[in-house]
Amino acid sequence: MRLSIPSSAEACRYWKNSSAASSSGTTRARVTRLRVCGSIHRARARIPEARCWFYVVYLFSCFRLWSLMRWPFLRFITLALGGVVPLLSFFMEARVAREVKAYLAEREAEAAAEAQTARPSSLAEHSTLTASIPTEGDR
């Protein structure tokens, strides 16, 4: 024997028919059943709408990451598909996070090495305007 779970539409039809057919059911019970039935349909109608907005936010974050990392356009497409294709998002998240962390660590190491090798100098040495102005010691 197969057990089938009715959808919300089937359950609502059952509730409407059972409340209309029963003579012992009160008007309040029928109204409550209809309210529950309507709220189920409204809630189920909002779920796809919410998922669409979450995907828009996901696409925006993919675009920001893609543009900041200056990856090729095909990489953006694979990032966008990561939110559509089931299970691909788990693999994409791990791979992209690993690559971005490695890139950021490399940039920090380069910046630290550059800061250590740079000699301290005054601002006047770098300015082209102040280099031509004679000072008290040069006169």
Image (cartoon, helix red, strand yellow):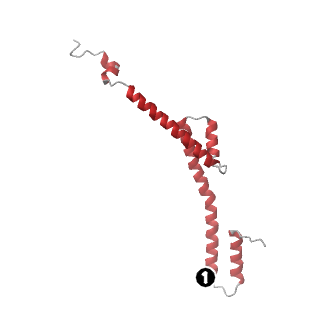
Q: How many marks do you count on the picture?
A: 1
Q: Quadrant of residue 75?
A: top right
Position of residue 69 relative to residue 93, above or below, is above
Q: Is residue 98 left or right of residue 139?
A: right
Q: Is residue 65 left or right of residue 5?
A: left
Residue 99 x %, y %: 55, 39
The residue pinned by badge 1 equals 28
Q: Is residue 1 left or right of residue 23?
A: right
Q: Quadrant of residue 36?
A: bottom right
Amino acid marked by disc 1: Arg
Residue 44 x %, y %: 64, 64
Residue at far bottom of view: 24
Which is more toward the observer, 34 or 88?
Answer: 88
Q: Quadrant of residue 118?
A: top left
Quarter holding the C terminus is top left
Residue at far top of view: 139
Residue 105 x %, y %: 48, 37
Crowd band around label 1 with a 10 angstrom C-alpha radius: few (<14), some (14–19), many (20+)? few
Position of residue 93 relative to residue 30, above or below, is above
- Residue depicted at 69% across the width and 77% down the height: 16
- Residue depicted at 41% across the width and 32% down the height: 112
Which is more toward the observer, 12 or 114?
Answer: 114
Asked which secondary structure carries label 1, the reply is: helix
- Residue depicted at 57% across the width and 42% down the height: 96
Which is more toward the observer, 114 or 62?
Answer: 114
Quarter holding the N terminus is bottom right
- Residue depicted at 51% across the width and 40% down the height: 101
